[in-house]
Image (cartoon, helix red, strand yellow):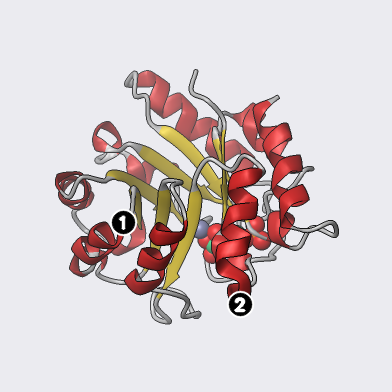
Amino acid sequence: MKNNLLAPSIIASDFTRLAEEIHACESAGADWLHVDVMDGHFVPTITVGPLFVEACKRASKLPLDVHLMISEPEKYLEAFAKAGAGNITVHVETCPDLPKVLKIIQSLGCTAGITLNPSTPASALDSALPFTDLVLVMSVNPGYSGQAFMPEMIGKVEEVRNKLNAIRSKAHIEVDGGISAETLPLMKSAGANVFVTGSAAFKHPQGTLEGVRALKKIAST
Ligand code: DX5
Ligand code: ZN
């Protein structure tokens, strides 16, 4: 079984104190930093691009987990790899030829992941599953931090875990959206092992250090 990993979603942090927020994540035991890239086209919001990833890279030694919520992601893979991405995840809804896109990401020296929107069935992964390093199951509709967790996605994680087991794949299952002290254990029992967390980490009443520390403890026990 893989280690359980915590990946704070940096777009929920206070950008005026970016380096401080990143260092709090590191001190509290975060494993990866999750960077949400949104283009205002595939999702309604615009967030950050390669320049921001490059700034995170200079501020941290943690692997950068770049979640591309953008149309035509293949146009930008090289820019994100050069900026310092460790893992790049694309949405199945944006890639007509998923195995090809995964291969390009891996040839750039990154690990490659595929993501499903809540309304996309797990069967959409089938053609690409043997080639992927990670499957990301969204437990909110992508676009914003701070949305309510969709409990229907617990069953989807179980389904993806069964599919990976059936082909003896060692790929990670990551979950993203509404992950908190209450919902993380549900996704862990379903078979997820990488937990993205935005609001629960960065909007914790006692601050980021405590927010990340508390979730890391739940993820690893
Ligand atoms: C949603 C993003 C998430 C988001 C998570 O589109 O992919 O990574 O920032 O934030 P929370 O944990 O607040 O749902
Ligand atoms: Zn994300």
| Residue sitting at x 54%, y 71% | 143
Frontmost residue, 191 versus 12: 12
Q: Disc 1 designates what residue? A: 84
Query: Within the image, what quadrant is residue 111 found in?
Result: top left
| Residue sitting at x 65%, y 28% | 220
| Residue sitting at x 67%, y 43% | 28
Q: Type of residue at label 1?
A: Gly
Q: Disc 2 designates what residue? A: 16
Residue 42 visible in the shown view: yes
- Left or right of 27? Residue 204 is right
**Which numbered circle lies on residue 214?**
none
Residue 119 visible in the shown view: no
Dot 1: element:
loop
Quadrant occupied by the C terminus:
top right
Q: Is residue 93 depicted above or below 172 in this figure?
A: below
| Residue sitting at x 54%, y 40% | 156
Dot 2: element:
helix
Whole-angstrom CA distance, mark 1 to mark 2, is 21 Å
| Number of marks in picture | 2
